Amino acid sequence: YYSMAKKTASAESPQPPAALPDWAQPLTEELNQGADGALIFFPGSTEFADSETGFFTAQANELQSAAVARPSSTAQVSNVIKALRRHLPASVPIAIRGAGHARCAGTAKAQGGVTIDTRGLKGIEIVEDSQVIKIGAGHEWLDVYAALEKHEPPLTVMGGRNTGVGVAGFLLGGGISFLSYKYGFGVDAVRAWEVVVADGTVVRADRDHPQTSDLWDALRGGSTNFGVVTAVEMAYSPHPVHLRAGTGFYLSPARRATLQALVELGSQPQSQADVPYAPIPHAIWTMTYVAGVPFKIIAILMSTTEATGYGALQGFTNTRWRVPFTGKLREMKHSAWAQECTDMTPKKGSRGTHRTITIKLDADFLNTAVDMWYESVESIKHVAGIMYNFIFVPLPVSMLKASRDTSGSSVTNSMGLRPEDGPLATVEMNFTWRKSEDDAAVDETANKFQRELAQAAEEKGLGHRFIFPNYASPNEPVMKAYGEERLAVLKAVASKWDSDGIFQDRVVGGFKLSK
């Protein structure tokens, strides 16, 4: 409705337009009069438009907030939370926006409410004494990798495999890295969180601090249940001397051989991962149907820190039906490989959604799942511009053990997973299409296939309760899937730090403890 860049020196308070909700006036008076300038913006301002756009999917872009807050410091986030608690009616939703990479509408935008845009929370600091990197929540992973790789010697961190993913959202959902086979989930590298809790207090939730370690632990995969994360401190490590990566493309007859190679990779014995300086492999298996293309393509995104050869990835490179000149591993930096993977994902602005389940890693069932996916494809071919990806990502025992060992628990990791559960695989169904009139058909196909695939896995004794947050859709019971014991811990922490249930009842998006 106005930009503070256009404010005059008038002592008179700016008045919101009459069409704005009643709560706009007191919020404006409290948040737009400080020395830092305006923090809250309404429709008609360039700031509002900027915060409402640039989400990953068209559906997310189409929703509209009633107002957006644009803090650029942790202190400003605290002021925003306090003001919202004082002046915003309980019926008006609040949402937290990071990079906006979540595919589902309403995940990071409060329709008819107030969206807090955290992209202004910038700042990257390498703290060599404690071997951590402090990262503002507004950054995407490309920023982080670039800063670490400029260091001498080069460094890296357990960040996202997509350069455009936001730091905070990735970590609050657990996060899988190219180095996860050895070091666990991305969030296992977090040593401390800077977070604004429900009463506006700024807390440094530290792994080693007795008064805040419970909050540190709960935030690791804890979604939007505990506060607004404004910065994280993550352990860094030397950039691998060798990081060799590439994508192999295969025709569909290669699927059995490539799936067998994936199972063998994900089933490597723990003893192999425990060897000092052992190479760290990683692979993502994906099969794609693209509207109008008469064949389906398999792509294997693979990397290793091995200096020469293919090592644990050899099963992929020795497979027939590989498209010539693909699958060659090339030396590159972490950022470059993450960017290559990003370039293979759907572009921002398309319609999109996804679903996920977790299964025990089994070659026969993976093939059964692909057969079922073929049938699912047939039901959706009529959708204009449809691209339908079917993706397997192994969670090997070495990864689950490394994750468990950072949790302070002798039993599970921060998301209720045990090494004894593995090896597992996350299964993702990823849909991109053009027209809003096809939304219902895509959702119907997605829900049906997810339900039938989960049932088939259970019947074979290969199902698993875990739902990986970063692949999940809003209606999936992610927190309950951590298991009753872990859920009880999270509820106790939420009760301590948010006794009024602000982040349970008023902050929308993410995965709530009650669902």
Image: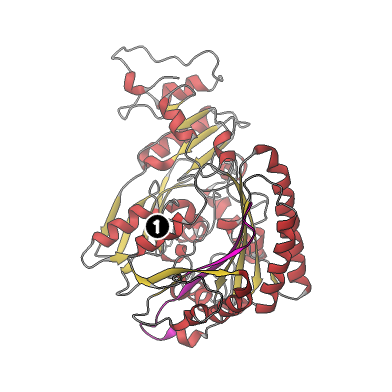
Residue 348 percent location from the top left of the image? 50, 45
Most extreme residue toward the right is 459
The residue wearing badge 1 is 339
Q: Which residues are magenta?
A: 274-301
Tag 1: amino acid: Gln
Residue drawn where x is 31% and y is 69% of the image: 239
Most extreme residue toward the left is 152
In the rendered structure, the answer to whether residue 252 lies left or right of residue 445 reads: left
Q: Secondary structure at mark 1?
A: helix
Q: Is residue 312 above or below residue 367?
A: below
Q: Quadrant of residue 450?
A: bottom right
Is 289 in the magenta? yes
Residue 506 percent location from the top left of the image? 59, 39
In the rendered structure, the answer to whether residue 196 lies left or right of residue 260 reads: left
Residue 326 visible from this viewpoint: yes
372 vs 231, nearest the viewer: 372
Q: Quadrant of residue 234?
A: bottom left
Residue 510 percent location from the top left of the image? 58, 49
Q: Is residue 425 above or below residue 490?
A: below
Quadrant in which the N terminus appears: top left
Circle 1 crowding by C-alpha within 10 Å: few under 14, some 14–19, many from 20: some
160 vs 186, nearest the viewer: 160
